[in-house]
């Protein structure tokens, strides 16, 4: 059992981001946090005890200590926090103070994910980020000083105009901060974003994508990080438990406007409308949104694509007899490894570069 909470507020909306987010404007924050607690009461059984909690966004660190405290107190009326093994909290550099971090630690937050994205000033400006490269280092130092057990640094590659040398510099700067986890995301150009309108579906090229992916793999694994998922690297014992649960297809409850959850074979998504979200919950109803029962074949297809991305691979019971020729081709071409028929199918580095295409071939 797992819990995801979506905080959609940002100081500024980045031009590449397709997640539901907006500036706070005139949002009644007290009504908003009370609404999340109320949604938990309506969706969850009393005493629900998640193993992981993940605050995503948006920028959760924009919540004031007062509003965050009210939110957690409200959640505790339904949720039992005693079994939480990992509590992650997304932040942006230079959006928090020592007082805030001390409060996060007091609440029980164990893992902070820092949206650094790049250490190059011109790329940060192009991405619409408000922080500077030096703010990233200061933020990591502050998190460490206040006793946050695990720190993740998010980076992005294949940005418009980004060189391989610039990507190397960002990776080396991140390593110098000695984080516990590094996420490296190949920028995708999502519809309904300014980047998509400006650059189209793809601004980079496959050769650069491969060079940057390979460079990250070489540098980070040489530094002792485990490349445990295509976009994620962790020091021993520091993999993201919440993300692993999602990649393994475990149920999780999503709370907040725009949040998605999967519980008991049903997938639901709350409407992308913070005002309607708060209004519905103030009236004692679940927020507007969509829900669907997931057919077994749909779940198989989803999990196949997710588990292939991990270094644990695809369990053999996901493979059908008709997949044998395709699997044999993957093994012969050096795109995958399988020690025995009862062993998982593991993608090689070459295979990870075409993981999406391999997943389609197994659907």
Image (spheres, rainbow, N blue to C red):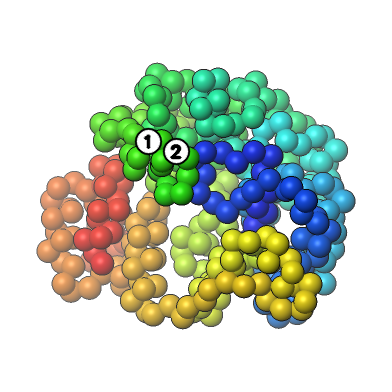
Q: Secondary structure at mark 2?
A: helix
Residue 242 visible to an observer of this rendering: yes
Helix, strand or loop for disc 1:
helix
Q: CA distance from mark 2 to mark 1?
A: 6 Å
Q: Are marks 2 and 1 in contact (CB under 8 Å)?
A: yes
Within the image, what quadrant is residue 44 found in?
bottom right
> Whole-percent x and y of residue 68?
81, 53
Report the front residue among 138 and 328: 138
Vertical order, 72 against 217 (above or below): below
The vertical placement of 33 against 181, above or below, is below
Give the left or right position of residue 153, taking residue 31 as reference.
Answer: left
Q: What label does residue 195 carry, if any?
A: 2
Residue in the picture at 26% in, 35% down? 206
Q: Residues within 10 Å of mark 1 (few under 14, many from 20)?
A: few
In this picture, residue 314 sits left or right of residue 231: left
Q: Which mark is residue 309?
A: none
Camera-nearest residue between 26 and 92: 26
Residue 27's x, y, as percent?
76, 54
Q: Which residue is mark 1?
A: 199
Residue occupying the point 51% across, 20% down: 122
Q: Quadrant of residue 132?
A: top right
Depth order, front residue of 20/262? 20
Q: Is residue 156 left or right of residue 144?
A: left
> Badge 2: how crowded within 10 Å, few (<14), some, or many (20+)?
many
Quadrant of the drawing holding the N terminus: bottom right
Q: Residue at x 68, y 54 (%)?
A: 7
Please report the residue visible at 69 percent of the width from the left and 39 percent of the height from the top.
11
Q: Quadrant of the C terminus?
A: bottom left
Question: Which residue is nearer to you in this view: 259 or 219?
Answer: 259
Place of residue 306 in the rendered image (x, y in percent of width and height, measured from the top left): 40, 59
Note whether 147 is above or below 257 in the view shown: above
Q: Residue 105 at x, y = what percent?
A: 79, 46
């Amino acid at each position: 059992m797992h819990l995801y909470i979506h905080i959609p507020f940002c100081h500024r909306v980045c031009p590449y981001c397709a997640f539901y987010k907006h500036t706070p404007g005139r949002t009644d924050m007290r009504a908003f946090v009370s609404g999340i607690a109320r949604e938990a009461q309506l969706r969850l059984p009393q005493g629900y005890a998640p193993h992981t909690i993940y605050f995503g966004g948006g920028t959760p660190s924009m919540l004031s200590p007062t509003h965050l405290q009210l939110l957690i107190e409200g959640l505790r009326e339904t949720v039992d926090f005693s079994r939480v093994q990992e509590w992650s909290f997304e932040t942006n550099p230079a959006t928090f103070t020592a007082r805030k971090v001390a409060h996060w630690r007091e609440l029980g937050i164990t893992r902070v994910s820092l949206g650094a994205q790049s250490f190059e000033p011109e790329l940060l400006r192009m991405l619409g980020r408000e922080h500077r490269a030096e703010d990233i280092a200061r933020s990591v130092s502050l998190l460490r000083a206040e006793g946050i057990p695990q720190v993740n640094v998010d980076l992005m590659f294949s940005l418009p105009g980004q060189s391989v040398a610039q990507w190397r510099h960002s990776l080396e700067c991140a390593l110098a901060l000695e984080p516990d986890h590094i996420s490296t995301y190949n920028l995708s150009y999502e519809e309904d974003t300014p980047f998509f309108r400006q650059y189209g579906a793809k601004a980079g090229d496959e050769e650069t994508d491969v060079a940057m992916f390979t460079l990250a793999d070489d540098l980070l694994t040489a530094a002792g990080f485990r490349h445990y998922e295509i976009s994620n690297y962790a020091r021993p014992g520091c993999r993201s438990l919440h993300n692993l649960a999602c990649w393994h297809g475990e149920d999780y409850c999503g709370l907040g406007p725009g949040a998605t959850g999967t519980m008991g074979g049903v997938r639901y998504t709350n409407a992308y409308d913070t005002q309607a979200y708060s209004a519905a919950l103030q009236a004692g109803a679940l927020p507007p949104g969509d829900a669907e029962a997931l057919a077994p074949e749909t779940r198989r297809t989803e999990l196949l694509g997710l588990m292939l991305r991990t270094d644990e691979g695809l369990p053999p019971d996901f493979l059908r007899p008709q997949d044998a020729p395709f699997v044999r081709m993957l093994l012969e071409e050096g795109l995958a490894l399988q020690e025995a028929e009862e062993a998982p199918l593991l993608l090689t580095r070459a295979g990870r570069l075409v993981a999406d295409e391999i997943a389609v071939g197994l659907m």
